[in-house]
Amino acid sequence: MQLRILFVLLLTIVTTAQDLPAHETITRQPADDIALAADFYLAPESAPVIIALHMLNSQRAAYAPIIPDLNAAGYAVLNVDMRGHGASGGARDWDAAIADVADWIDWLEAEGHLKDKGIVIMGASIGANVAIISCAESAVCAGAIALSPGLDYRGVKPEGALVDGLADREALLVAAGGDSSSSTAIRQMFLNAKGPVTARMVSGRAHGTRLFDSDYDSLSGLITLWLKEQFQPD
């Protein structure tokens, strides 16, 4: 078993939130003809593309604070409105949302955006659960970032995907200590994981992408540092 926990944040690479970089808004329709929307931020480096999945009752704008940092660090970002949220149509269906991630991965591959190092899927709250499951199901997913995951959000249960599906891939689990559901979840998933999992407990009670509001610099620094350590652009 290869586990690790990150106790110390190095803030040497932290920046403050900036204006969003140039991007292309993408609309596509999967097999059920529901219109799905995302913003794609291109980057020139040979690094994983990051797919970002927001929380329930949120939308892709929730990731606006960290996108400039990710893009400046050399990562392309596909920032998705999950179905039934933001500019994406359809009803909220989490099995379909997982299938939609696979469809977005197909789009990245068809457009030539997948690099040798594949993708990293980042999600918040129920989006974190979807991210873990989607990464486990994708051969090109190198790792997952889960902000405030849960053991069971609306029937979406990621622990089996983390333990077995990501046994040979990277994962970063983050939760606030005062967020009892998510802090319990990352403790349990960390202890049961077979693969290289990094777990970080932060102060406060913020949940999901609201962690950016409570301590943006530390969270951005944590994510960009973890990505640099695991997937340093060539």
Image (spheres, rainbow, N blue to C red):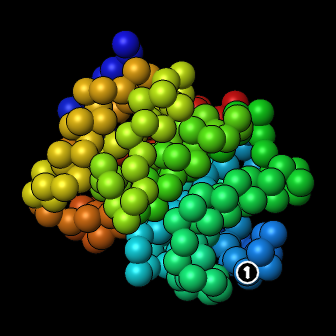
Quick check: 106 left or right of 20?
Answer: right
Residue kind at label 1, given as amino acid type: Ile
Quadrant of the frame with the N terminus: top left
Q: Which residue occupies the extreme front position in the image?
A: 155
Question: Residue 63: image x %, image y %?
Answer: 47, 69
Residue 6 vertical position relative to residue 90 in the rendered view, above or below: above
Looking at the image, which is closer to me, 229 or 203? Answer: 203
Q: Quadrant of residue 163?
A: top left
The residue lying at 70 percent from left, 77 percent from top is 36
Looking at the image, which is closer to me, 165 or 213? Answer: 165
Quick check: 15 left or right of 80?
Answer: left
Looking at the image, which is closer to me, 115 or 28? Answer: 28
The residue lying at 67 percent from left, 73 percent from top is 38
Q: Quadrant of residue 103?
A: bottom right
Q: Is residue 230 visible?
A: no
Residue 217 vertical position relative to residue 210 in the rendered view, above or below: above
Q: Quadrant of residue 108?
A: bottom right
Circle 1 is placed at which residue position?
Answer: 34
Quick check: 74 left or right of 151?
Answer: right
Q: Is residue 90 visible?
A: yes
Question: Residue 79: image x %, image y %?
Answer: 60, 67
The residue lying at 54 percent from left, 72 percent from top is 93
